[in-house]
Amino acid sequence: MREATMREAPTAGPAVPEDGPRRSVHTLVGSDGRPHPSGTPGTLGGHRRLRLYGRLDCPSALRAIAAGGYVGHRVFFADEATAVAAGYRPCAVCLPDPYRRWKALRVAREAS
């Protein structure tokens, strides 16, 4: 027989909270460069210190994350226009065409 001091396993609560389903809150960087809560996830990821953005499936970012880096500086953007307005540049690996355009503009500015 089991002893009376043993406790029963807690029962699972309702699948949906009484006040309705919970919505995920995502933190995205806005065009002002500051984090803002959002009900929708970002479409682009970036690195806060390097000031670059790219696709969420960027091979370079995924390698860095797998190696244990990058995550502490990771930021997310709703779209490319917001990332550019916040002062971030495109990733050369996953966004080669936007990167080439950004680089050409930068070289032109430095030449003038």
Image (cartoon, rainbow, N blue to C red):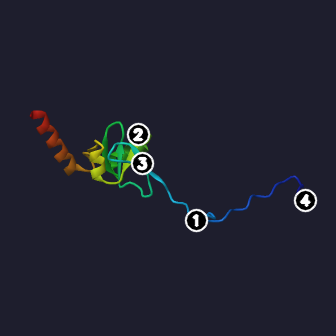
Q: Amino acid at mark 2?
A: His
SS assignment at label 3:
strand
Disc 2/disc 3 C-alpha distance (Å): 16 Å
Query: Horizontal and vertical percent for residue 46?
Result: 35, 45
| Mark 2 or 4, nearer chain start | 4
Q: Amino acid at mark 1?
A: Gly
Disc 3/disc 1 C-alpha distance (Å): 24 Å
Q: Nearer the viewer, mark 1 or mark 2?
A: 1
Query: Horizontal and vertical percent for residue 81?
Result: 27, 51
Q: Residue at x 30, y 42 (%)?
A: 52
Using a 10 Å C-alpha cutoff, classify the residue at mark 4 as few (fewer than 14 neighbours), some (14 to 19) or many (20 or more). few
SS assignment at label 1:
loop
Query: In the drawing, what numbered circle is on residue 20?
Result: 1
Q: Which residue is mark 4?
A: 1
Q: Which residue is mark 2?
A: 73
Q: Amino acid at mark 3?
A: His
Query: Horizontal and vertical percent for residue 80?
Result: 28, 52
